[in-house]
Amino acid sequence: QKIIDWLAEEFIKDEGVDLRKDPMALQRLKEAAEKAKIELSSTTTTEINLPYIMPVDGIPKHLVKTLTRAHFEKLSDSLIQACLGPCKKALADSGLKASEIDEILLVGGSTRIPAIQQLVEKFFGKTPSKGVNPDEVVAVGAAIQGGVLTGEVKDVLLLDVTPLSLGIETMGGVMTKLIEANTTIPTKKTEVFTTAADSQPSVEIHVLQGERPMATGNKTIGRFHLDGIPPAPRGVPQIEVTFDIDANGILHVAAKDRGTGKEQRIRIEASSGLSDDEIKRMREEARANAEADKLAREKVDKINSADSMIFSTEKQLKEFGDKIPSDKKAAIESALSKLKEAHKAQDVAAIDTALAELNGVWQAASEEMYKTAQNTGQTTSQPGPEQSGNDEVTDVDFEEVK
């Protein structure tokens, strides 16, 4: 395209006519540009000769230009430099350094351009392999992968990776990742979640793919429900969610209630069923919205923290209320009321203030109860804001299924 544009601009200078507006002339330009590009991979100069390219004022005009390799490289410099982007990303995703790469394969006919080969050699510090035809290397790799998957090829190990992260939607519309992007497959990951409401009878497993922290910014690839959860206080049921990707890239998602053993599964074929352009777009959107997404996630996390604090405080007041001095209990109830108001309004600043106040009054109440217990020679459990009740349970809750 760079050669086409250069030829067209040269003709405009000479004749005042844009060849790109004429379909027949444009087709001839494309053919000549492709031929020139190929020739410049093996020679330092080429002549582009297109007789009778277009009549101007009834007079046939010819296009004859000489293009050197140096000028071609100057025209294409931005595209040539862009080749380093995928190289840098591949290294970053793999966690390797350029010096740790054993072999470099060139893919696609354009990699025959000397400037590209020199750029790659300079970046990696070694000469790219020329033992495989760049036009055939992808087909050869696909054939080998096919042989591995069918079992016909047994002495080659080819590792594929997940292009985007996979996870589920949890409380507050957050995407909780189970399998990170660029994880080698096959792979399997299990995490334990819990319920977000008392006596919650079922949970929805909303399977997502993408890099955004909030569920709405990612792609839905599956949904299913796990029903029949016995009535229990929030946070008590343990729901085991397993993501399992096999060698064929097929995703199996299972949700199991540890209490009853009840289980539901879903099979998602082509879990990465996105085109390269879609994957690129989703990654770019994640980068472009990183700051806004971070703020949204922080707000949801703060609201969820307030929700958990309200729940644990009410639970502690029921359990220890008769043991807390009346003045301390009143202070706790006042701080709790402020936190509830801030939580309802989803006011992050007010939540921070109320959380700090509630933690403070809880600490004061605990210290006084501890001193009283020491003076009377008794041992008692101390109230206070609860953290995660079970270290094995991930501190994110499913939203209640309506």
Image (cartoon, rainbow, N blue to C red):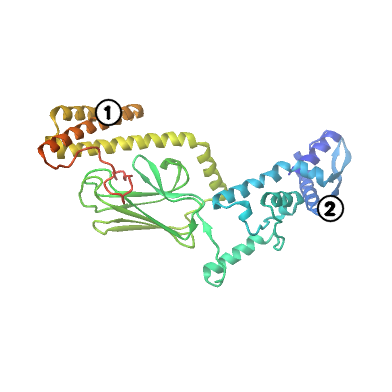
Q: Secondary structure at mark 2?
A: loop
The mark lying in front, picked from 1 and 2, is 1
In this view, 213 is above or below 151? above
Q: x, y (%) of residue 111?
A: 71, 53
Q: x, y (%) of residue 142?
A: 60, 63
Q: Nearer the viewer, residue 290 or 92?
A: 92
Report the side of 30 relative to 187 (left or right): right
- The residue identified by callout 2 is 43
Report the side of 376 relative to 297 (left or right): left
State the image quarter where residue 217 is shown.
top left
The answer to whether residue 11 is visible is yes
Report the side of 84 relative to 179 (left or right): right
- Is the residue under label 2 in contact with that under label 1 (CB below 8 Å)? no
- Report the residue at 33% width, 35% height from top: 303
Q: Nearer the viewer, residue 238 or 323?
A: 323
Q: Residues within 10 Å of mark 1 (few under 14, many from 20)?
A: some
Kind of residue at disc 2: Thr
Kind of residue at disc 1: Glu
Q: Residues within 10 Å of mark 2 (few under 14, many from 20)?
A: few
Q: How many marks?
A: 2
Q: Which mark is residue 357?
A: 1
Q: Nearer the viewer, residue 254 or 52?
A: 254
The answer to whether residue 22 is visible is no
Report the side of 214 relative to 401 (left or right): right
Q: x, y (%) of residue 380?
A: 15, 42
- Report the residue at 25% width, 50% height from top: 237
Which badge, 1 or 2, comes first in the chain's sequence? 2
Q: Residue furthest right?
A: 59
Q: Secondary structure at mark 1?
A: helix
